[in-house]
Amino acid sequence: MKRIFSISTFILVCQTSQAQIIYSEVFGGHKKAQHEILISKPIDSLGIVSFFNLTYFTVDYKDRKAIDPFIYSVATFNFNQYIGIATGGYITNQGFVPIAAVSLQYFNEKGDLYLNVFPTIELTRNPNYEMFGLLVYNPTLTKKIKLFSQLTFSTNFNFKQHNFSFQQIRLGLDFRGFQFGLGCDTQIPTFRNPVSNKLETTFNPNAGVFLRKTFN
């Protein structure tokens, strides 16, 4: 029995190696400014439990009181380095929503490719569903410079309609832990037009530049 337990523990330890990403970013778009923080790291030494939090606050240049917050925060129990189950919640201007999710992640041996996708269900009476994900590709160009690219995306929907989506694209260079370059944030909400009483979807891009610091 002890031998079986020891073997199982060894396999679990070998399979729960987790990537860590921590950064703070300032993004200046042509319509809005944004400050963003992301923390993705294992909580315990074995990497069995990990924590993922994306927080950003967006401010409109024309109306500084129009602050748009978004916080997505979950704790994940990892069965191995590729899959786990997560629970937590997200916060928007509409309030707090508890969620449960599956964590699907991948990172290569070089450490320059990271993907984490969360198929999510809201823990509410009439739940919506969401696909939230983060993709980072950071290959080496020279001894001191790396290419930096990142895609963050989220789509919220139910069986009747699309509710809301957003995408964040970053493309630039990495120099000694600092990333900088061009970016574009796009929000795509679906709402009911009060005049026609029909559902309408709008496309709201915010293009600009970003500066980021990554902490190891």
Image (tube, rainbow, N blue to C red):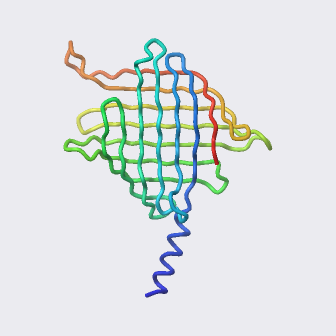
In the displayed structure image, the side of residue 190 where residue 40 appears, left or right:
right
Residue 20 coordinates in the image, percent (x, y): 57, 51
Where 57 falls versus 106 (above or below)? Answer: above
Residue 149 coordinates in the image, percent (x, y): 61, 37
How many labels were placed on the picture?
0
In the displayed structure image, the side of residue 184 where residue 121 appears, left or right:
left
Where 155 falls versus 196 (above or below)? Answer: below
- Residue that sits furthest to the front in the current view: 65
In the displayed structure image, the side of residue 4 where residue 210 appears, left or right:
right
**What residue is at 61 percent from the left and 48 percent from the top?**
113
**What residue is at 42 percent from the left and 60 percent from the top?**
77
Residue 124, quarter of the rendered image? top left
**What residue is at 26 percent from the left and 47 percent from the top?**
123
**What residue is at 50 percent from the left and 19 percent from the top?**
32
Judge by depth and name the residue closer to the eye, 40 or 169: 40
Judge by depth and name the residue closer to the eye, 73 or 16: 73
Q: What quarter of the picture does the N terminus occupy?
A: bottom left
Residue 93 coordinates in the image, percent (x, y): 34, 29
Residue 84 coordinates in the image, percent (x, y): 43, 58
